[in-house]
Image (cartoon, rainbow, N blue to C red):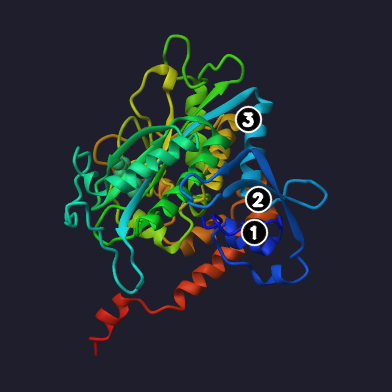
């Protein structure tokens, strides 16, 4: 997601091709330069106007909805898409409760993209040279950076649930407290922006790519999801006796049915598939399991009141509005159609063909293109615009010759 910081200023009107480019992180398809490139209006959400606490000069950021000139929500807006999914839950008297878990790397500033990323020099002047997941001292070398991150999260009202060092060298995870899905999408967006900007200030490069380093774990944005009854707040996944309800299984069934079609929405770039295809606890399957991190859908051990489904597919590079909309729409599809899940997997397992996911961006584009479900849930305007912009992004990737090709292929006869 790359919208942050681009829309500063007073003119809150933009062309729809630009929306595709900056909000979807893609490229505007040619037709948007022509007749389909009419303006949209950006309407700031009054609850999401923030003074930026890290900025030395006064600056504010407003999260906006992209609307048509006649006031209708634009079919291209990912925030609008999430709102429409939530409105459909509300028609049933339900409200999703979600949490996002964001992993990210903190690197030394890297002005030359030809060079691999390096961990930064810590306070002690050393570079971290091994991933020390959960180590109590591992974040110490970056204390001034994290102190400012904490201060600014507090000032912006972003409630922090956990912070830890992850498995990769200089890889961290901060989890936001669970809550309403639109709020969590806004908070996740703000949090990524905050990380980037505070990183710049400290001479660091905070990277939310799915797989910035080879032979090292990638970065995810796992989504934890439950659904409560509006008013009572009762979790519809648990019965009074604490057992899982039929609704819980239907929700999983919906996630499984849609995951392959929606893979591009969770894994939006070429690099996303580097994470999924060299997995370190980053599954590319739609299996589900009681508590196995190799399954795309995990049911974390919890009290019945917190029974939830964790979607482990989204990378840290996913647009939080879109990933949440897609995951929750899939669950709702299962609830409405009363879909049954497969049997849960246990231990070492083989992925059945029907639960395998696309493992390249090209395959994911082709899958989404053929998805009637995606068009039904998100509308043809969005899916066509998204696919067109992603096809251009993929073509632009194939315009480049990578260091691997120069290293390996140049030596061959
Ligand atoms: N702690 C974890 O579950 C690791 C997740 C892993 N980094 C991923 O990319 O999905």
- Residue drawn where x is 55% and y is 29% of the image: 96
* Residue beneath disc 2: 77
Disc 1: residue Cβ within 8 A of ligand 1's nearest atom: no
Q: Secondary structure at mark 2?
A: loop
In the image, residue 153 sits, relative to residue 141, either above or below, namely: above
Residue 233 in the image: state x and y as whole percent.
55, 17
Give the camera-side residue of 214 and 258.
Answer: 214
Mark 1 or 3 closer to N-term? Answer: 1
**How far apart are labels 1 and 2 at the CA level?**
8 Å
259 left or right of 118? right
Residue 170 in the image: state x and y as whole percent.
26, 52
Q: Label 3: how many residues lie within 10 Å, few (<14), some (14-19) or many (20+)?
A: many
Q: Label 1: how many residues lie within 10 Å, few (<14), some (14-19) or many (20+)?
A: many
Q: Nearer the viewer, mark 1 or mark 3?
A: 1
* Residue beneath disc 3: 89
Q: Secondary structure at mark 3?
A: helix
Tag 1–tag 2 contact (CB < 8 Å)? yes
**How far apart are labels 1 and 3 at the CA level?**
27 Å
- Residue drawn where x is 80% and y is 52% of the image: 69
Q: Is residue 120 visible?
A: yes
355 left or right of 49? left
* Residue beneath disc 1: 19
Q: Nearer the viewer, mark 3 or mark 2?
A: 2
Residue 93 in the image: state x and y as whole percent.
65, 22
Image quarter where the C terminus lies is bottom left
- Residue drawn where x is 30% and y is 47% of the image: 144
Mark 3 or 2 closer to N-term? Answer: 2
In the image, residue 37 sits, relative to residue 1, either above or below, namely: below
Looking at the image, how many numbered discs can be counted on the residues? 3
Mark 1 or 2 closer to N-term? Answer: 1
**How far apart are labels 3 and 2 at the CA level?**
19 Å
């Amino acid at each position: 997601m790359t919208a942050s910081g681009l829309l500063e200023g007073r003119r809150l009107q933009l062309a729809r091709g630009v929306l595709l480019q900056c909000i979807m992180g893609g490229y505007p398809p040619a037709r948007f330069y022509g007749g389909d490139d009419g303006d949209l209006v950006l309407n700031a959400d009054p609850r999401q106007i923030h003074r930026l606490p890290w900025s030395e000069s006064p600056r504010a950021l407003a999260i906006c909805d992209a609307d048509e000139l006649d006031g209708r929500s634009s079919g291209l807006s990912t925030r609008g898409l999430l709102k429409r999914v939530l409105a459909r839950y509300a028609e049933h008297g339900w409200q999703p409760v979600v949490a996002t878990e964001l992993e990210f790397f903190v690197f030394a500033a890297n002005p030359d993209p030809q060079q691999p990323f390096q961990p930064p020099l810590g306070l002690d002047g050393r570079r971290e040279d091994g991933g020390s997941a959960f180590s109590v001292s591992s974040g110490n070398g970056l204390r001034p950076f994290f102190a400012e991150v904490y201060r600014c999260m507090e000032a912006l009202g972003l409630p922090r649930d956990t912070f830890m060092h992850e498995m990769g060298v200089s890889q961290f995870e901060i989890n936001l407290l669970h809550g309403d899905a639109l709020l969590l999408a806004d908070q996740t967006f703000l949090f990524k922006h905050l990380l980037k900007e505070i990183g710049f200030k400290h001479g660091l490069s905070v990277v939310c790519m799915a797989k910035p380093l080879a032979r090292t774990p990638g970065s995810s944005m796992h989504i934890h999801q439950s659904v409560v009854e509006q008013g009572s707040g009762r979790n519809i996944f648990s019965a009074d006796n604490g057992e899982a309800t039929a609704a819980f299984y239907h929700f999983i069934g919906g996630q499984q049915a849609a995951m392959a079609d929606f893979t591009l929405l969770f894994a939006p770039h070429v690099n996303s598939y580097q994470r999924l295809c060299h997995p370190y606890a980053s599954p590319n399957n739609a299996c589900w399991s009681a508590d196995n991190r190799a399954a795309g859908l995990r049911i974390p051990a919890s009290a019945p009141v917190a029974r939830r489904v964790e979607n482990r597919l989204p990378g840290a590079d996913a647009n939080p509005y879109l990933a949440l909309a897609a995951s929750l729409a899939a669950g709702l599809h299962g609830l409405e159609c009363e879909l049954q899940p497969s049997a849960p997997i246990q231990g070492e397992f083989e992925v059945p063909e029907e639960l395998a996911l696309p493992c390249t961006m090209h395959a994911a584009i082709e899958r989404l293109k053929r998805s009637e479900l995606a068009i039904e849930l998100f509308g043809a305007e969005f899916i066509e615009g998204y696919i067109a912009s992603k096809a251009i992004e993929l073509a632009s990737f194939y315009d480049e010759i990578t260091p691997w090709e120069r290293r390996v292929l140049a030596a061959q006869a």
